[in-house]
């Protein structure tokens, strides 16, 4: 026979082991139950699910923009050069990329005629790529086609081009067109001037009003009339062409 103290110790160890076995059993049951629970549905698309979508679905999901409202919203401020629902794979030999959001009607304009447009301008770089829009300003941009007052990219977008495999059809009144304009068709000529003024009417336009409080002029100047930055990023323009006004 064991002494009384040894018997008590053995009984304590026996009870403790039983308790540990019960706790372990409860933990194992809980783990098994958790493994059987269906995984919570992730409300955000994963990288794998996005990559499995067709390209058009990815563009639609990422932009969520209708091409019919392109001029009302302007180029995307998050991704200015993104297609925003438009397929910008049409490029002329000049380097201009374009896509039509809306077809106009009537007759195309010719050099020497007065053009009137509303536009939304953005850059392809910067924390705030959106630069300026004439929408809701009540003052469309107007000039005489071919008079040298307006960047070549806008005139090319309106008048169109011919003679190459990727010719650009002219815009018709009421039409809306998005263009991505390279530097050589944009404001690059300003940097070649000895004393650029960087003001509407003094240099090639369009140029946002300097006295506007929305900061559009400052953003435009930083990108396109800054002598300390010779590189000029592409311009994204949404153009709505009006008829005779």
Image (cartoon, rainbow, N blue to C red):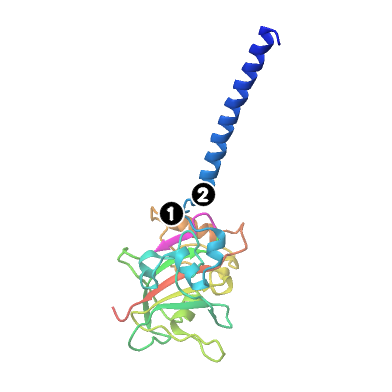
Tag 1 or tag 2, which sits nearer the N-term?
Answer: 2
Residue 225 visible within the image: no
Tally the numbered discs.
2
Check the image and report above or below for 217 versus 159: above
Helix, strand or loop for disc 1: loop
Q: Is residue 129 magenta?
A: yes
Disc 2 marks which residue? 36
185 left or right, relative to 239? right
Q: For the point 55% across and 41% down, which residue is it?
A: 31
Q: Residue 109 at x, y = what percent?
A: 39, 86
Q: For the point 46% across and 70% down, which residue is it?
A: 237
Neighbour tally class for label 1: few under 14, some 14-19, many 20 plus, Cα within 10 Å: some
Q: Residue 33 at x, y = what percent?
A: 51, 44
Check the image and name the residue furthest to the bottom.
163
Q: Quadrant of the C terminus?
A: bottom left
Residue in the foreground of this view, choosing between 3 and 228: 3
34 left or right, relative to 210? right
Q: Residue 141 at x, y = what percent?
A: 38, 71
Q: For the point 59% across and 33% down, which residue is it?
A: 24
Query: CA gap, disc 2 to disc 1?
Result: 57 Å
> What is the magenta range?
126-133
Disc 1 marks which residue? 215
């Amino acid at each position: 026979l064991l002494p009384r103290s040894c018997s008590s110790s053995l009984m304590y160890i026996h009870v403790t082991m039983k308790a540990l076995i019960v706790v372990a059993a409860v933990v194992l049951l809980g783990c098994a139950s958790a493994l059987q629970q269906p995984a919570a549905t992730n409300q955000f698309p994963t990288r794998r699910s996005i990559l499995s979508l067709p390209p058009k679905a990815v563009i639609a999901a990422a932009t969520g923009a209708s091409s019919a409202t392109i001029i009302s919203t302007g180029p995307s401020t998050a991704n200015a050069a993104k297609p925003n629902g438009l397929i910008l794979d049409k490029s002329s030999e000049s380097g201009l990329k374009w896509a039509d959001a809306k077809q106009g009607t009537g007759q195309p304009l010719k050099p020497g005629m007065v053009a009137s447009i509303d536009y939304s301008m953005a850059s392809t770089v910067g924390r705030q790529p959106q630069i300026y829009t004439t929408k809701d300003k009540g003052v469309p941009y107007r000039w005489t086609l071919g008079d040298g007052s307006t960047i070549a990219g806008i005139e090319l977008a309106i008048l169109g081009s011919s003679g190459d495999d990727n010719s650009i059809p002219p815009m018709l009144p009421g039409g809306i067109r998005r263009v991505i304009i390279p530097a050589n068709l944009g404001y690059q000529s300003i940097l070649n001037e000895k004393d650029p003024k960087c003001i509407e009417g003094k240099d090639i336009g369009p140029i946002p009003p300097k006295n506007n409080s929305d900061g559009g002029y400052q953003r435009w100047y930083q990108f396109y009339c800054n002598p300390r930055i010779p590189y000029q990023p592409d311009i994204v323009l949404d153009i709505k062409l009006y008829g005779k006004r």
